[in-house]
Image: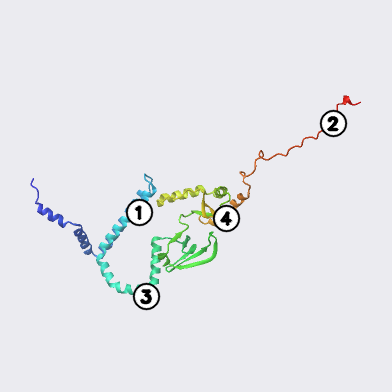
Amino acid sequence: MPFPNTHMLDEFFQGFSMRALLLSLRAGFTQLSFLGHLALTVFVLITAMIVSRLISRYYRKPGTGTTEAKRMAYLVARNTLGGVTAVLLLFIWAGELRTFALSIAALAAAVAIVCKEFFMNGLGSLMRAVARPYSIGDVIELGAMKGEVLEIDFLSTRLLEQGPSGYVTGRTYEFPNMMVLLNPIRKLSHTGRFVHELVRVPMDPAGNVARAERLLREAGETVCADWIEAADAHFRRLESSHLIALPESRPLAMIEPVDPKRVDILLRFPCQSNRRLATSQAILHAYYVLAKEPDPDELPDEQDTPSAEVPAPAAAPESMAAPIGKII
């Protein structure tokens, strides 16, 4: 069988390039009507949602591989799918977006200059609605502010202030949503019903640091014994659903040197998210009760205690010590 003309094949493959493919797709999308664009957009979004669900189900099912590897692969697949979907939507609406952008460019520039703060508050609200870094009832820390989220609107967020130990002060914070764009947010109740909390006991390095560490751990195990199993089951469910590695639930005591004259004993323990302060105070109370008890290792042994010497009986006088037979 004779081979086809190579010159014709070269011309065919030169014309079939990536640039030509993209131009042909763009021309085809431009010729569609508005209803065709809308139908194609709905089809692309539904397909992306289905593929995203399948990817999530595939990586969350139990299998081989570490949690970190599965999480990294899941994030790469999800981001790739989002990028492909965005490119397809851009090609579908390219003609309409060009006309729309040219018509509102001048107006958008003027509004952005005059109402910059209002516009940034709107962007902060949009970011919060999309990324959902916090919601009503969460305990967050933003800069020097820390408290429970009470109210969220388009322009601002209101917090119920909490002190360093988690106690409610009764005061409120209200900050503009533009601060969400400019500051990192610490969400202290991210793990839901149960959270990991930390207590700190300062002491002198010359003291019995090992005994203090042991007593603080025993106090934590005693106070948290009723919900350790429930907290561990809760954290394991979070690991499988969010593809993250969480610490174990049992209380863990640690030693942290602060300066040459101070060392802190830290205790990390699980507790209910709405009882952080009460649990911390109960652990500290139990610790100080145990610390007042005498240390059995420091008590002297009975065998080492010197016994009182019994005095020897006094010697009898010679006249009394004489035998009776010699008495005349």
> Looking at the image, which residue sits at the far left?
2
Q: Of helix, strand and loop, which one carries label 1? A: helix
- Residues at marks 4 and 1, CA–CA distance in whole angstroms: 40 Å
- Residues at marks 1 and 2, CA–CA distance in whole angstroms: 107 Å
The residue where tag 3 is placed is 114
For label 2, the crowd category at 10 Å Cα-Cα, with few meaning under 14, some 14 to 19 and many 20 or more, is few
* Residue 230 visible at all: yes
* Residue closest to the eye, 43 or 279: 279
Q: Of helix, strand and loop, which one carries label 3? A: helix
The residue where tag 4 is placed is 281
Q: In the rendered structure, which disc, 4 or 3, sits on the residue that comes first in sequence?
A: 3
x 33%, y 54%: residue: 78
Q: Is residue 107 above or below residue 274?
A: below
Q: Which mark is residue 75?
A: 1
Q: Of helix, strand and loop, which one carries label 2? A: helix
For label 3, the crowd category at 10 Å Cα-Cα, with few meaning under 14, some 14 to 19 and many 20 or more, is few
- Residues at marks 2 and 4, CA–CA distance in whole angstroms: 77 Å
Q: In the rendered structure, which disc, 1 or 2, sits on the residue that comes first in sequence?
A: 1
29 to the left or right of 55: left
- Residues at marks 4 and 3, CA–CA distance in whole angstroms: 51 Å
Q: Which mark is residue 318?
A: 2
Instruction: Give percent across and percent down for residue 165.
Output: 54, 59
